[in-house]
Image (cartoon, grey):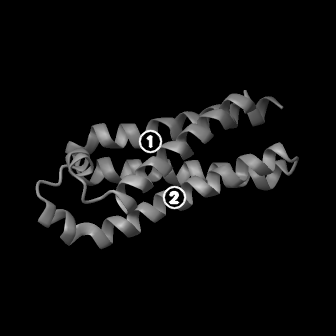
Amino acid sequence: MLIVGLILAAAAAAFHVFIFALESLRWTEPETRKIFGVPSEADAVTMKQLAFNQGFYNLFLALTTLLGIGLVILGAQTVGLTLVFAGTGMMLAAALVLVLSDRSKLRAAAMQGTLPLLAVIVTAIGVAAA
């Protein structure tokens, strides 16, 4: 189960790297504006600095998780699992904040939070079974 949990954590990290790319590198592009519901390029330009910063938050959560996975693989299980749970737990918390602050963002929060939720649950079961 631990391996499945780590695979889910890696998938959650990959999704957050994708979000980073959208927010920090492709924010003003029409496809990205459509995904985030930003109606005009002028609005996107106004929001660009905030999106850029937010994208890096997503990247750092992903890197925390990936570093944790790497450390588990290298045998530093306690430190590695701590980072995996910290990274995926914060991803999940961010998804909860999103939906609790705006119910219309339920779909986005589900996309952002489902893999981290599964990673936390399955990894915890894997650790408990070991």
Q: Secondary structure at mark 1?
A: helix
How many marks on residues? Answer: 2
In the displayed structure image, the side of residue 127 where residue 38 appears, left or right: left
- To which quarter of the image does residue 110 belong? top left
Q: Nearer the viewer, residue 36 or 45?
A: 45
Amino acid at pointer 2? Leu
Q: Position of residue 24 (x, y in %)?
A: 39, 62
Point 55% across, 33% down: residue = 118
Q: Quadrant of the C terminus?
A: top right
- To which quarter of the image does residue 124 belong? top right
* Mark identifier at residue 59: 2
Q: Nearer the viewer, residue 4 or 96?
A: 4
Q: Position of residue 10 (x, y in %)?
A: 61, 41
Label 2 environment density (alpha carbons within 10 Å; few <14, some 14–19, many ≥20): many
Residue lying farthest right? 75
Q: Secondary structure at mark 2?
A: helix
Q: Which residue in the structure is indicated by mark 1?
A: 113
